[in-house]
Amino acid sequence: MAAKRDYYEVLGVKKDADENTIKKAYRKLAKKYHPDSNAGDAGAEQKFKEVTEAYNVLSDKEKRKLYDRFGHAAFDGSAPEGGYAGAGNGAGFGGFGGSGFHGFGGGNPGGYQEYHFEGGDMDDILKQMFGGTGGFGSRKSSQRGFRGFDGGNGGFYQYGNGAGNGGFHGFGGDYDENGEDLHADVSISFDEAAFGCEKRITLSDSRGGAGKTLQVHIPAGIDTGKSIRLRGKGMPGIGKGAPGDLLLRVTVGEKPGFERKGSDVYTTVQIPFTTAVFGGEAVVPTLYGNVVCKIREGTQSGTKIRLRGKGIVSMKDASVHGDQYAVVQIAVPTRLSEEAKRKLKEYEAAAQGAERTRQRGAA
């Protein structure tokens, strides 16, 4: 038989965890491994037993003290004086079978025997375990088995024999808690982020079943790293608790020729050498169409042309837009005719002469 795992490890909590932390950890794991959510999965059923057994001990102050001191030996009959050896009426967790819920029966606090809750629907049972408007009635009898929940006492009644010996301490029938948020990733294009869109996404099922398809509104102006919150699309709540939300973390794709920095957009525009020298016009592509820009005489490479309002819209205020900056690159000709080369040589000589004259004047 495989050695039992440490109860703190089973619940995923530290050894100094308080009662509330332990309770939350168990509640989360019990939902995760609930057999109704893992039909036919024997491994999940065993996990459900394991986390319940761990919670049964760690939620009880006396049992926890013994466990912290002696470990599993406190309950298996091998503990030294002061342990839980021989405590025959402690209650453990039963399994699941064709007849429904197996109750909590005798044995040591760390063990379990099977007793049946006939005709019980597991989903209804779990709902009662974690909250609801009322509880199960008592099923006291000469046989040990499932004794029942009380919907308003703030905790389970104990499981065990008719005298109520031993038991599992849990959550009351009036316990409510909002469902947990779920997280997923969604990739969108540059333009979808800039202008917003309606997008259908399919979330994969971790158990291999059919994915869930949702219609999602992508707000204009969203950027990489931001999240879209879909209220009520997360985990269901417990009792009267509201369902959690689904948060979609956004990744925005690239757009050739465009770079986004916050709400501003950067592009490059190439202009001929002569346009840089004499001035003129250049066509600049923007997210909203082409714009004709005036190029001043003597424009240098690296000059930024600011196009106001041609950037990304603000998510907070649709009337506010960033700007676009077109960075000028001067295109150097690679093929020149002999006449063009001669003209450029004449220009070079004239420019050098003008520079020498300026330097003599400055001296």
Image: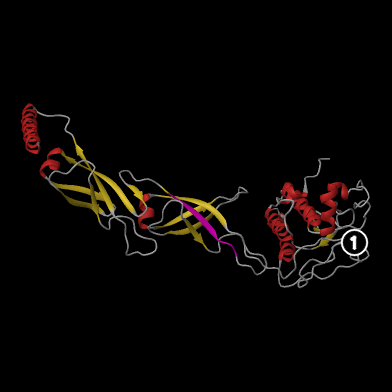
- In the drawing, does residue 216 fall left or right of residue 89? left
Residue stretch rendered in magenta on the structure: 243-251
Q: Residue furthest top?
A: 338
- Residue at image location 31% in from the left, 55% down from the top: 311
Q: In the picture shown, does residue 357 fall above or below 247? A: above
| Quadrant holding the C terminus | top left
- Residue at image location 12% in from the left, 29% down from the top: 336
Where residue 237 appears, x then y in whole percent? Answer: 63, 64
- The answer to which of 96 and 18 lies nearer the viewer is 18
Which residue is denoted by mark 1 in the rendering? 144
- The answer to which of 232 and 227 lies nearer the viewer is 227
Q: In the picture shown, does residue 220 fall above or below 157? A: above
| Quadrant holding the N terminus | top right
Q: Quadrant of residue 193?
A: bottom left
Q: Residue furthest front?
A: 363
Q: In the picture shown, does residue 200 fall above or below 360? A: below
- In the drawing, does residue 184 fall left or right of residue 300? right
55 inside magenta stretch: no
